[in-house]
Image (cartoon, rainbow, N blue to C red):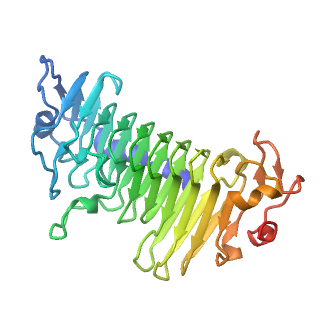
Amino acid sequence: MRRLLASAAPLLILLLVTASPAAVVTVDDDGGADYAVIQDAVDSASWGDTVLVHPGTYTAVEDLWCGGYGSPVCVCIRGALTLTSSGGPGVTTIDGEGKVVCGVMAEWGDPVVIEGFTITNGPQSYWGDAAVVLDAGVVRNNILIGFSTGVSTDMMWYWPGSVEPRRTRGAAVVIEGNDIACYSGGLYLRTWSSSRTDVVGNTIHGGHDVGVSVYGVGDILFVDNEVSGNEVGVHIRNPSRTVGVQFSIDMFSNQIIDNTERNLDIRLSDINPGSACDITIGGSMENANDCYGAPTSLKLVTYDYDVFVYATHNYWGSVACTTFVPLFDIAESFPETAFVFEPFIDESHLVTYDCQGVPVRESSWGAIKALYR
C-alpha cells in the first residue's frame, strides 16, 4: 500500500505545478527569445508558468541571493513554475563558475519542476553547496556535477535563525532520472515536516563521502537507483529529535554496490522516545536489491528508538558463512525482534538460501547472529 501511495507524488506535483500553465517564457543566450538570461525569465514568470531554456551555457547573475540565504546562487525561483530545457542536459548548462553556492534554488518551498540541465561548477567547499535546493517539486533528467551535493532538500540550512521561511507542509519531492557525481554526496534528503520523497532511477556515483544521506521525517521511496563508488552508499540516520514522529523508508530494486567502506549504514541513535522508524530493504523477490562489493554491506545501530528493519530477499554477495563477518556489522544491542534478515537470494535472483546452501524460512536476526559472532 505504501508503494501505491508514494506513486501518487508525481501526479500531485504535476497538478500543483504544470496544470494549465499561464504562459511559456523562452530563454536563449544567442537571442531570438523572450530573454537571454534565465533569471530574467524566472523573475518575469507567474505562478504555473513554464520557463523554456534553449541550448547554451548560462552563468550566474552577479551576487544573486535567494530568500534569506546569504550566498550567491545561479538561479533563484520564487513561486511555483517549471524550469526546463528544449534540448536536454547534453546541450544546456547552468555554470556556477566556481563562485555560487547553489545552482538552482526554489526560494520559499513552493513546488517547482527542474528538468533537463547540466548544473555544474560549484565551489565544492562543504556539503551545503548544492546543484539543486528545494523542498517541494520535481528534479528530473539532469546531470549534476561539480558541486559538493547534487540535490538537497534541507531548506532550513539556508535560512538564518532570525528568518522564518514559508513552508509547504506535507510537501512531495520527486528526484528522478538524474546522473549525479558530486564531491561530498549525491543526495541530502532532510525534511522537517511530514513530507514524502520519491527517489527513482537515478545514478549516484563517485562521491567523496556519502552517495545518499537520509535525515528527517515522513516517507521515502527509493527505487531503481544505482549508488556506487562512494565511501558510503546510503546513510540513514537520526530521523528527528521531536517526540512522536514517524519515519518510513522503502528500498526496492536498487543497486547499492562497490562503495569503498559501506554500502548501507543505518544509525538511529540519541532519539527521543515515542518516535518510530520502519525500513524495508527488498522484502520480496520482485523488490530485491543488489548490495555487494563493499567491505561492509550493512551496518546497523540503534539506541532508544522504536525501529523495525525488514531486510529480506536481497543479494549481499556470497552467502557462504565465512563471508558474514566482513559483510555485516550489526550492533549487539540491536533487538532481535526489530530485525528480519533472511532469506538471502543468489546472484540470479531465483533461489533463496541460508549460509549452509539450502532453502530457508524467514527469521529474525537472532536466528543467524551466532553464525558469525
Q: Where on the picture, by quarter, is residue 11?
A: top left
Nearer to me, 131 or 24: 131
From the top left corner, tell me how far across and down residue 182 is, in percent.
39, 43
- In the image, taking residue 329 as reference, residue 368 lies left or right, namely right
- In the image, taking residue 3 as reference, residue 151 lies left or right, namely left
From the top left corner, tell me how far across and down residue 245 is, in percent.
44, 73
The residue that appears at 12% across and 16% down in the rendered structure is 32
Give the quarter of the figure containing the N terminus: bottom right
- In the image, taking residue 104 as reference, residue 303 lies left or right, namely right
The residue that appears at 64% across and 53% down in the rendered structure is 295
From the top left corner, tell me how far across and down residue 259 is, in percent.
56, 48
Q: Can residue 245 be seen in this view?
A: yes
Q: Can residue 5 be seen in this view?
A: no
Q: Where on the picture, by quarter, is residue 356?
A: bottom right
Nearer to me, 180 or 173: 180
Placement of 250 over or under 216, stated as above or below: above
The residue that appears at 69% across and 57% down in the rendered structure is 327
